[in-house]
Amino acid sequence: MRPFKQVDVFTATPYRGNPVAVVFGADDLTTEEMQRFAHWTNLSETTFVLSPSDPAADYRVRIFTPGVELPFAGHPTIGTCHAWLEAGGVPKTENIVKQQCGVGLVTLRQNDGRLAFAAPPLIRSGPVAAEDLAAVCAVLQITPEDIVDSQWADNGPGWIAVMLADADAVRALEPDFGAADAYDIGVAGPVKVGVVGSRSDDCAIEVRAFFRAGGQGTEDPVTGSLNAALAQWLLSSGALTSPYVASQGTMLGRQGRVHVEEANGEIWIGGDAVTCVDGSVAI
């Protein structure tokens, strides 16, 4: 049996955020065993904590969707760090955690009980070609005239970011997940579509994330990588100022809150996390 936690991320209220499964003591597991267990949990991501091979790291993590391994993902990073600290992990540097994963070292910081990671750099930015935007419109079932602005905001998963008029327009979307061709565009695999619109309450923007997983379209409850990419776009363009809070998951019955702050030339993506399941698993 191995220690196991299931953590709800980007929320302080259980079952209102985005869950991640965290397995400890995974050094002896094979990739096939990890992938099989991640497929069984059927969560958007399952992580496995291992001893670090980089002396600068506090721990190493491997991140799996039900179908593939990811080099990095946002909510699993915060959820795994929360679980590691809760299980008694002590970072080498006070209030700073160094996570080793597929993209290398990721820095997390602790601030007022909330964890935040430094946003990874964009590997693709700039305008979206008309044919790609038309494909995105097919998925979102909107017209090009409904789009206020758009941008490649790819920090690994392949995000195309689309801004609509306001939060109401974002919440009103009824995507056509059968428009499969709309996902087979861009570089290095399926494109993921992130949609954003301005709000007027304590949250600056309403966010939704649509992508194809395992051949089927889905909406992600709360997405760290997308919010990290959106922050780099919206802050650099002047559309938003730091700090701000993003809302995500509303249409899925969640209340995800992503805290964004720019400090010392870095953008930090933060959120609360709460453990919902604490026990052991047999793998």
Image: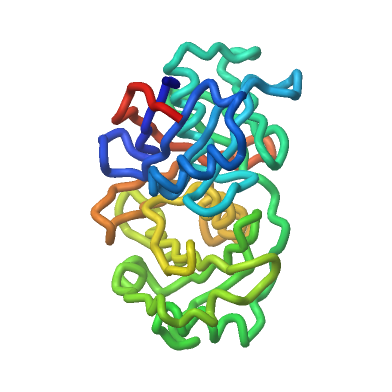
In the image, residue 102 sits, relative to residue 210, either above or below, namely: above
What is the x, y in percent for residue 151?
A: 61, 69
Rendering quarter of residue 95: top right
Quarter placement of the N terminus = top left
What is the x, y in percent for residue 104?
A: 72, 36
Q: Nearer the viewer, residue 11 or 84?
A: 84
What is the x, y in percent for residue 267?
A: 61, 42
Rendering quarter of residue 204: bottom left
Residue at 53% x, 44% y is 35
Rendering quarter of residue 112: top left
What is the x, y in percent for residue 141?
A: 39, 83
Q: How is the image coloured?
A: rainbow
Residue at 38% x, 43% y is 41
In the image, residue 42 sits, relative to residue 4, either above or below, namely: below
Residue at 59% x, 47% y is 69
Side of 257 relative to 231 (left or right) = left
Q: Is residue 199 visible?
A: yes
Q: So how many labels did they put on this image? A: 0
Q: Is residue 261 visible?
A: no
